[in-house]
Amino acid sequence: MDAVQIVEGEVRELIRLRGLDPARQGHEVRLLIDAVVNDYSERALVSPLPPLGALSSAQRQVFDAVAGFGPLQPFLDDPGVEEVWINSPREVYVARGGESELTSLSLTETQVRDLVERMLATSGRRLDLSSPFVDAALPDGSRLHVVIPDVTRRHWSVNIRKFVVRARRLEHLVELGSLSPSAARFLAAAVSAGLNILVSGATQAGKTTLLNCLGSAIGPRERVITVEEIFELQLPLRDVVGMQCRQENLEGAGEIPLRRLVKEALRMRPDRLIVGEVREAEALDMLIALNSGLPGMASVHANSAHDALAKICTLPLLAGENISAAFVVPTVASCLDLVVHAERLASGYRQVAQVLAVGRRVEAGVIETAVLFDRRDGELRPTGSGMPVDDKFVRAGHRVTDLLEV
């Protein structure tokens, strides 16, 4: 046993004796570690105890072990790391700037399981043979996804998508170059006017960040209800109630799906409804809510803005055989106003690629659309296309022609 392990054991015993909670009493735990490390260093000078080495390094390692996520903690603390994933105990990867790299970290099967159990401890979610998948949020807002055998071939698969906040408002996206000033002004006006907006993009394209930034343009007196699989949205607003789904318990009861949350949200006096991500039949409940005059926003996985519109016309059909495209397509046309598509380049850079206006006319099952902003020569510019529906802008006191000046 090396010196750090000896100190870690002593710290854990003192934490137990003093009844400290490392997750909530980090300051007290850090002071305790400092005292134990200094005491051990002095004892090692006059005894055969193994030397501790650099005290600051030992203090950090012990704190990560007892109050953090052990050997993974340095990656979680590194602002340049966007994602961490484990394919096997000896294959730990990280992503920096959109590019993956294999780390030199090597774990054991027991360490991986202990780390996952520690991560799930505060989430209220479980992982076992009857429920081999789990999605959970870590205390810092990062998203944890784990799959265990026999769904995976042999090893536990662990993925931690860090919530790296680089933008909270549309102005921040402009500063980062992800959005043009003219498009930011238009989107801010669209949100304040109560347009229904669908954010689309591939995985890691920045949909949640974009949804947060759009949400920042919501009026300060509006009551916002958010529903998500797990908590990811962090809206910079005062009157916000967030709800997340819940797994079924060991008896197979108690599950709360996204469809239930959308329905419950309507009973909470919302001025605005935000669905973190639409994946399945909850798309129908969302459309019904928006069709009642409630402004809202949502995100969806898609390769383009047009694909997102086609997908949102298809997902409600999963709700049952009695739901037909003859009902869904006109409902989408009457509900949605804009599709904002985000993309991630090969370099890892994220940007808004297109803003699509959704019209009210449907011809042969196809919804009328118009591209309002598109990327040309690397810049998001107005196309000069007319806005199919501008009544919401007019009621809010905005002139669409001014917002769409080329």
Image (cartoon, grey):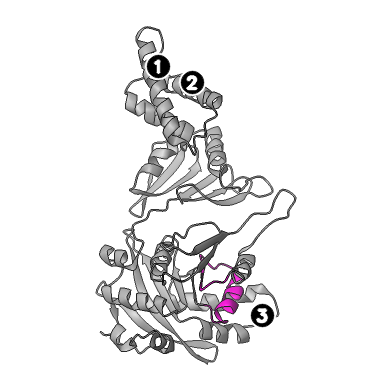
The disc labelled 2 sits on which kind of residue?
Glu
- The kind of residue tagged 3 is Ile
| Picture coordinates of residue 36, whole percent (x, y) | 42, 21
**Residue 323, label in figure:** 3
Secondary structure beneath dot 1 equals helix
Residues at badges 2 and 1 in contact (C-beta under 8 Å)? yes
The answer to whether one can see residue 404 in this image is no
Asked if the stretch drawn in magenta spans residue 260, the answer is no
The earlier-in-sequence mark between 3 and 1 is 1
Residue depicted at 51% across the width and 65% down the height: 276
Q: Nearer the viewer, residue 97 or 392?
A: 392
The quadrant of the picture occupied by the C terminus is bottom left
Against 111, residue 140 (above or below) is: below
State the CA–CA distance, disc 3 to disc 2: 63 Å
User: What residue is shown with label 1?
Assistant: 40
The x and y percentages for residue 44 are 38, 12
Query: Does residue 220 appear left or right of residue 349 in this picture?
Result: right
Q: Is residue 20 above or below residue 357?
A: above
On the rendered structure, is 44 left or right of 254?
left
Instruction: Check disc 2 and report the residue beneath it.
Output: 10
- Dot 2 lies on which element? helix
Q: Which mark is residue 31?
A: none
Q: As rendered, which of 258 and 345 lies closer to the eye?
A: 258
Q: Kindly report the distance in space between the C-alpha atoms of the residues bearing marks 3 and 1.
A: 70 Å
Question: Taking 228 as reference, is 94 above or below it?
Answer: above
Of badges 3 and 2, the one in the foreground is 2
N-terminal of the two: label 2 or label 1?
A: 2
Instruction: Give the residues drawn in magenta, as a range.
Output: 269-294
In the drawing, does residue 150 fall left or right of residue 122?
right
